[in-house]
């Protein structure tokens, strides 16, 4: 079970409109050290703003470290990176070499988490990459996503995790890991119980999944999950179905727009089982929904980078924050309800059964293919 620490202040940040100003302000207040990790970094208006803030920090002597994923940032301009480095920002890539043999498990393990840490005092965790909300295909409305700022004892694990990753990547790149000689500020600043939860490929392989499962199995009233890429294994599905059978309202807010066809159709293969089990499914149509959040029983909540799919739960480095606080959970729950009310359509069991046979068949073929691929890379016994 996830150990929640008291004394934290966790602030919900909706979309880039709230996240990027908070991040930029924190960077501008930094005195010693900035650690920033992102899966995608786009050199758009937002990316340029954050880059300028990082360079300003480096110019005043702050140790400024930017860690990018080699696949997610494979198209990032070298000139953009060189400008950052010329401005004093240390830039490293996690697994920069993309092998053509992409079915090798170690090449599929990515740094998918989105984290920032300022002076070991305030951390940011969530699902928001460094990219403008309006940077979407076909000029559709801005994507929906969440992050949170964290202050208090919970930042200790986050800070240690980020410093350890920076040292590891620097060592692999034969670079000196230039980190400040400073301590994490774990002073109690609020009354919220929270914990930083990571997923890696060593000691914490199932930590995020277990945090979800523990909360789901204890649920008594309601489970609301909003997830961009939802393809859970059997154990996760059974936990949700068991909760529904004992009278818990289970609500899934999923993405309607097809972004990655294989995963999107594979997800729909599960609709019949979930709907038959009394689980509500709402598909968000208004824009791209990139959220990875949940609220359970009006007091337990999580925000982070982890989808509920094989890529996040079995392969990637991910990071979430878990919060046990009624006010925080209620704020997130109300925001999710607004999304359901204003931008989503409920999928009914009868509608799914009446869907064209070819659509349902393609969904099952996609699901079977995903399972086959997991077996090929060594995850045939997926629970």
Image (cartoon, helix red, strand yellow):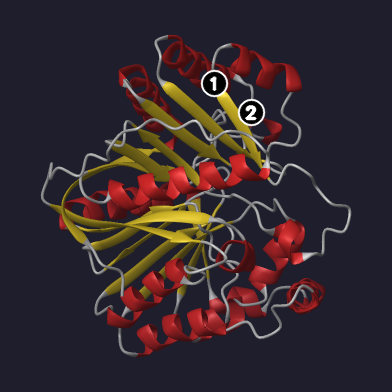
Element type where label 2 sits in the image: loop
Image quadrant of residue 324? bottom left
Q: CA distance from mark 1 to mark 2?
A: 16 Å
| Residue at x 70%, y 73% (from the top left corner) | 355
Label 2, residues with CA under 10 Å away: few <14, some 14-19, many ≥20? some
| Foreground residue among 2 and 220 | 2
Q: Is residue 145 visible?
A: no
Figure quadrant of the C terminus: bottom right
Residue located 41% across and 69% down the image: 251
Q: Which label is found at residue 42?
A: 2
Q: State which quadrant residue 229 falls in.
A: bottom right
**Residue 75 locus on image (x, y percent):** 76, 32
Secondary element at tag 1: loop
Residue 10, given in percent of the width and then of the height, sits at: 24, 45
Screen quadrant of the N terminus:
bottom left
Q: Nearer the viewer, mark 1 or mark 2?
A: 1
- Above/below status of 146 relative to 5: above
Name the residue that disc number 1 marks: 89
Whether residue 312 is visible here, answered yes or no, is: yes
The answer to whether residue 133 is left or right of residue 207 is: right
Number of callouts: 2
Q: Position of residue 74 (x, y in %)?
A: 75, 37
The image quarter containing residue 51 is: top right
Name the residue rendered at 48%, 86% in the picture.
Answer: 238
Residue 290 left/right relative to 120: right
């Amino acid at each position: 079970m996830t150990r929640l620490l008291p004394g934290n202040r966790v602030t919900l940040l909706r979309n880039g409109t709230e996240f990027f100003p908070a991040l930029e302000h924190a960077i501008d207040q930094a005195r010693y050290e900035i650690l920033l990790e992102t899966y995608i970094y786009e050199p758009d208006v937002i990316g340029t703003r954050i880059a300028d803030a990082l360079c300003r920090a480096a110019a005043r002597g702050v140790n400024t470290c930017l860690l990018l994923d080699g696949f997610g940032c494979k198209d990032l301009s070298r000139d953009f990176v060189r400008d950052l480095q010329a401005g004093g920002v240390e830039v490293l890539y996690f697994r920069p070499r993309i092998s053509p043999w992409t079915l090798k498990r170690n090449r599929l393990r990515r740094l998918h988490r989105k984290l920032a840490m300022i002076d070991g005092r305030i951390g940011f965790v969530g699902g928001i990459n460094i990219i403008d909300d309006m940077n979407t295909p076909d000029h559709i409305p801005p994507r929906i996503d969440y992050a949170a700022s964290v202050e208090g004892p919970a930042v200790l694990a986050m800070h240690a995790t980020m410093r350890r990753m920076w040292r590891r990547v620097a060592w692999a790149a034969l670079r000196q890991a230039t980190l400040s000689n400073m301590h994490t500020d774990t002073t109690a600043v609020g009354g919220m119980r929270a914990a930083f939860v990571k997923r890696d490929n060593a000691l914490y392989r199932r930590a995020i999944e277990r945090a979800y499962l523990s909360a789901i199995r204890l649920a008594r009233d309601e489970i609301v999950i909003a997830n961009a890429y939802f393809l859970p294994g059997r154990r996760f599905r059974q936990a949700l179905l068991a909760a529904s059978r004992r009278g818990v309202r289970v609500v899934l807010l999923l993405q309607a727009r097809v972004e990655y066809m294989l995963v999107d159709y594979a997800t729909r293969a599960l609709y019949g089982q979930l709907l038959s089990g009394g689980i509500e499914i709402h598909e968000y149509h208004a824009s791209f929904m990139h959220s990875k959040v949940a609220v359970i029983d009006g007091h337990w909540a999580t925000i982070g980078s982890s989808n509920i799919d094989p890529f996040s739960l079995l392969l990637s480095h991910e990071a979430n924050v878990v919060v046990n606080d009624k006010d925080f959970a209620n704020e997130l729950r109300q925001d999710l309800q607004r999304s359901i009310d204003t931008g989503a359509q409920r999928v009914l069991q009868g509608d799914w059964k009446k869907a064209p046979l070819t659509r349902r068949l393609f969904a099952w073929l996609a699901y079977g293919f995903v399972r086959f691929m997991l077996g090929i890379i060594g995850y045939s016994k997926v629970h």
